[in-house]
Image (cartoon, rainbow, N blue to C red):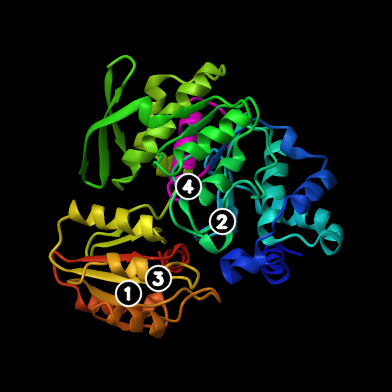
Amino acid sequence: MNYQETIDFLYAQLPMFSRIGAPAYKVDLTNTLTLCNVLGNPQNKFKSVHVAGTNGKGSSSHMLAAILQQCGYKTGLYTSPHLYDFRERIKINGALCSKEFVVDFIEKIKPHIATIQPSFFELTVAMAFQYFVEQKVDIAVIEVGMGGRLDSTNVILPELSLITNIGKDHMDILGNTLEKIAFEKAGIIKPNTPIIVSEYLSETRPVFEKTAQEKNAPLIFAQEVFKVLQFGCEAYHLWVEIQELKTGQTKKYELDLPGIYQTKNILGVLTAIQQLRLNGWNIDAHSVSEALKKVKALTGLHGRWELLNENPKIITDVAHNEDGIKQIIQQLQHTKYSRLHWIIGCVKDKDITAILNLLPKEAIYYFTKAQIPRALAETELMKLAHAKDLQGQSFHNVDAALFSAEKNYREGDLILIAGSVYLVAEVKR
């Protein structure tokens, strides 16, 4: 098979959570461990950092990878889902894994697929681990797909683990309370391995403390190490002044990720960097500052309050759950615009009512959907939104919605595309 035939095979033959939801989620690590065993257990042959969380894990993973890369380390990065190219999931120093590797890997593992019956995610995790070993990375940042305890990535023994935050998402799988969700995320805590929590709530802190104590894992709450003194947005960059609480020293950082929610993520990232230094990694302060200025350039990150076009002004963001939309609303309060045109689509298994309750009533909405089975029909979304006094029309796909928004656009307006990772992925760049 050539590369395109290989990708078509993966999409057609293997259950994909992004397309069908919960039925693609496997409730144990057996398949992943079996795949890794077939490959000679690559998960044990490279150093890593493991990152989980409801929101912010992707941004935090990319920031950590950018910093390690800037410091001269050959850095692997595994994230999901991808937006535009399957190979975005598996990168080294910002470069996509090769098409030849993908083809060769699937040819090698294909005889075992019928027996093991892995999901799409399980196979891509094993693929990433094999690539990082073959390419001899110094370290890899591994982002959890969902949850943590039963996530396919949870077969590694990392240098440290990072949990960004806990919010209400995937409750049909992870549990219907913050405590239950935190328990699943805390599943990445390993014996005697430092665990850093970027942001905790009164409901989640005891869960982390209990699991860390059981595993004899040093637990560090980033909010007790660093504090944001002030921040601001300028020309689609974010500046943050941060104080280290122990020393009282302050430092100002500039980020090319302008989302205000990065003020929470950066505390966990800086605490993780501090811990990696204690583990013997050579990470200098200047490289940290320089890397944060160019995370997108170093790693290829997209979809985090990303300006796609200046006139008309079009911004995309992959926020897709209640907490993510709250962060979007906060961002809008710091953004100048005349009228807001919001192109929105959601998947069926989200708490649609909670999302709609947060949306500004003065915006003009363009209800649409990503072209996947999990997507909520645009007409159904519009019906639910109209019941909440949100006004707008429905469109079969994001291109049609964007065409209409551009027709209605006037100078000073803002077009926002948000509500689903998969919707953002279908915007023609």
Residue at numbered disc 3: 352
* Quarter in which the C terminus is drawn: bottom left
Image point 31% across, 20% down: which residue? 245
Image point 72% across, 48% down: which residue? 126
130 up-or-down from 351: above or below: above
Residue at numbered disc 4: 58
- Judging from the image, what secondary structure is the residue with disc 4 in? helix
At label 3, which amino acid type do we have? Answer: Ile
Q: Position of residue 140 (x, y in %)?
A: 60, 36
- Judging from the image, what secondary structure is the residue with disc 3 in? helix
Determine crowd level at label 1: few under 14, some 14-19, many 20+ residues with C-alpha closer than 10 A: many
The circle on residue 9 is none
Q: Position of residue 121 (x, y in %)?
A: 66, 57
Which residue is at the front of the view, 386 or 287?
386
Tag in front: 2 or 4: 2
User: Which of the two labelled residues, at mark 2 and mark 1, occupies the earlier sequence position?
Assistant: 2
| Distance in Å between CA atoms under marks 4 and 1 | 26 Å
Residue at numbered disc 2: 174
- Judging from the image, what secondary structure is the residue with disc 1 in? helix
In the image, the segment drawn in magenta is 52-77
339 up-or-down from 79: above or below: below
Q: Can residue 228 be seen in the rendering of this structure?
A: yes
Image point 81% across, 61% down: which residue? 113
